[in-house]
């Protein structure tokens, strides 16, 4: 949380540039996975632009109080409860985004032909292979696959990070 706040404060220009171009990046990434034809790509770009406009007008204003609360929690000293609060807040924001985006995603996916579906499967398989290569066998593409193995591998690292966040004297 502290690292995220520091990055956001020091990289406001980078964040602004990234946010202002997010609709283009999302459309480009989706096209890479889906191999869209011209009409599909134009339709996708319209849907993504609409989503981005909605996000800018309704969601960004919601982030200011969230960031203010995070700043206050950091100033008071980070606790386990603060970390849990931050995780819950991020999950809540993600759920709002996912609920808003799912209907538009379904509209795009419904237009895919068999060849595009094969292309999508290949892209997803490749992404899963890359994930497993980077995170180890058993990390699996499924949410619950390899969870215990990941926890064992990640626990020492997460304990160190947690300790550093909660006790600044620990280097």
Image (cartoon, helix red, strand yellow):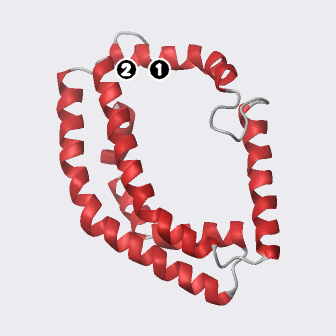
Q: Quadrant of the N terminus?
A: top left
Q: Position of residue 92 (x, y in %)?
A: 35, 44
Q: Position of residue 131 (x, y in %)?
A: 72, 42
Q: Position of residue 38 (x, y in %)?
A: 66, 88
Residue beneath disc 1: 161
Are the two marked residues, 2 and 1, in contact with CB atoms closer than 8 angstroms? yes
Locate residue 6: give its quadrant. Answer: top left
Relative to 143, say whether 147 is above or below. above
Locate residue 147: give its quadrant. Answer: top right
Question: At x 49% / y 63%, what residue is drawn?
Answer: 102
Q: Is residue 131 left or right of residue 56?
A: right
Locate residue 113: give its quadrant. Answer: bottom right
Task: Give the secondary structure at mark 2.
Answer: helix
Task: Give the secondary structure at mark 1.
Answer: helix
- In this view of the protein, which residue sits in the foreground, 34 or 24? 34
Question: At x 47% / y 71%, what residue is drawn?
Answer: 23
Relative to 139, say whether 81 is above or below. above
Label 2 packing within 10 angstroms: few (<14), some (14-19), many (20+): many
Q: Is residue 12 left or right of residue 103?
A: left
Q: Can you tell which mark lies on residue 165?
A: 2
- In this view of the protein, which residue sits in the foreground, 135 or 18? 135
Q: Quadrant of the C terminus?
A: top left
């Amino acid at each position: 949380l502290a690292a995220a706040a520091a990055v956001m404060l020091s990289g406001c220009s980078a964040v602004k540039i990234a946010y202002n171009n997010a609709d283009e990046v999302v459309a480009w990434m989706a096209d890479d996975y889906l191999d869209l034809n011209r009409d599909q790509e134009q339709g996708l770009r319209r849907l993504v632009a609409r989503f981005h406009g909605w996000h800018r007008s309704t969601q960004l204003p919601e982030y200011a109080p969230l960031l203010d609360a995070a700043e206050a929690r950091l100033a008071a000293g980070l606790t386990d409860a603060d970390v849990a609060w931050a995780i819950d807040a991020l999950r809540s924001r993600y759920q709002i985004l996912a609920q808003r985006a799912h209907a538009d995603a379904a509209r795009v996916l419904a237009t895919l032909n068999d060849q595009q579906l094969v292309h999508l499967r290949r892209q997803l398989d490749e992404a899963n292979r890359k994930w497993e290569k980077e995170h180890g066998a058993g990390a699996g593409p499924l949410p619950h696959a390899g969870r215990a193995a990941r926890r064992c591998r990640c626990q020492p690292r997460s304990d160190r990070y947690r300790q550093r966040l909660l006790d600044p004297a620990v280097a």
